[in-house]
Image (cartoon, rainbow, N blue to C red):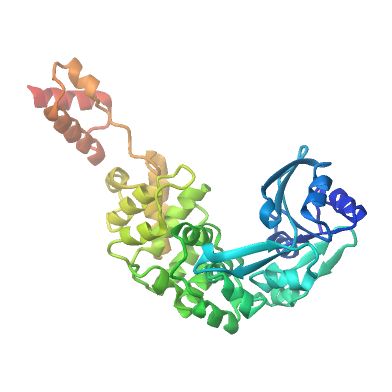
Amino acid sequence: MRVPKPIPELARAVDDAGGRALLVGGGVRDELLGKKPKDHDLEVYGLEVDALIDVLRRFGRVDEVGRSFGVLKLTPRGGAEIDVAIPRRDSNAGPGHRGIAVEGDPHMSIEEAARRRDLTVNALLYDPLTDELIDPHGGLADLRAQRLRAVDADTFLEDPLRALRAVQFAARLGFTPDPSLVVLCREASLDELPAERIFGEWAKLLIKGTRPSLGMTLARDAAIGRRVFPDRVDDPALDEALDRLAAWPHRDRSSGWRLAAGLLVWLAATPDPEPTLERLGVHRYEGFALRREVLRAHAAAEAPATTATDLRRLSDRSQVLLGLALRHARGEDVDGALALAAALGVLRDPPPPLLRGADLRALGMPAGPAMGLLLREVYEAQLDGTITDADEAAAMARAKLA
């Protein structure tokens, strides 16, 4: 398994201090799937937090913000941040995700520590010193079978957010949930989950999902969708639409745009998507005006999008690329419209106006409502294609002012 620096050296230092450092979680899973992990997490056994901090400080800066529950962040010199934690117990101290109490215990067994994880494929561990893969709960077999299964029924239900995590992992990994996992997700109490945590899991599903339909099927079978999003109109046909969107090679690379496109398709059958967006707490995402663009594109979902005039007019109502993404997801052929919109320069923004207020002031027109109306009239002609350059725009304005 590929292990980046300085993890082997760090594991050796932990070993010399009397502990054991193991790679855990998604990084191990992704390596076994042949994917490049986004990050690497270390779990350290046998060392109290103070002793662990002393070891980590030899390798770089240590952020102790999570010290109270045994979680540290190491920024190695010249390297990427590494999450380092001691084994910990999660217990349900109250309703919802905020009711989870966490207590670090470096002397737990590996099997017991792994039991607190949500899914078996996320409960694999790897020893960078011995090249040993540790599989206390059958995660490797589930990985090979492309199956999602809970590590432990009791610990899974301690955190109701795990039901939504299972949904987004089904979508991201393209794995099928075990029937026992569907039952657990159906039993999870979702009423107290905070909007920001729901949004976090749903965003991962829509941005990173390779087979969103598998996540949506789990959400439907476990009654998650209707409990968490009661205002959304569920249409199973949208599952396949989301799969088509996920495979569309023309999707914008930015996470904000991908999330907007996913939300747009997911809400396509919902007459008024605003209550669901409000439930998610959606406003902006990584600089992208998420709510505004989803609502605009939803309102323009049935607008024509074939001719140059159609596309210029659509660009004035919503982002054309989002609209074409929705049409592609619904099974329409949008290749011609995509090429034409790119040639017109209106894929993401409307055409810049050929006539501006300064131009009208130069013609002697004072600022005011009449100026705004004339600017809009000229812009409408520009969208229609009846005027194509600044001279024609100025000529139209002069004729209107005469």
Q: Which quadrant is home to the N terminus?
A: bottom right
For the point 29% across and 43% down, which residue is it? 316
User: Horizontally, is 304 left or right of 164 in the view?
Assistant: left
Residue 10 pos. (x, y %): 84, 49
Count of all numbered marks drawn on residues in the image: 0
Which of 355 and 231 lies nearest the eye of the viewer? 231
Outermost residue, right side: 16
Which of 353 and 170 lies nearest the eye of the viewer? 170
User: Horizontally, is 347 left or right of 89 in the view?
Assistant: left
Outermost residue, left side: 402
Which of 47 and 391 lies nearest the eye of the viewer? 47
Q: Is residue 37 above or below residue 397?
A: below
For the point 40% across and 55% down, which residue is it? 281
For the point 51% across and 50% down, which residue is it? 255
Q: Quadrant of residue 272?
A: bottom left
Q: Which quadrant is home to the C terminus?
A: top left
Residue 73 pos. (x, y %): 70, 48
Q: Is residue 306 visible?
A: no
Q: Is residue 233 above or below residue 282?
A: below
Q: Is residue 173 above or below residue 59?
A: below
Q: Is residue 358 above or below residue 342?
A: above
Residue 303 pos. (x, y %): 27, 55
Residue 290 pos. (x, y %): 40, 49
Q: Is residue 377 visible?
A: yes
Q: Quadrant of residue 116?
A: bottom right
Q: Quadrant of residue 143?
A: bottom right
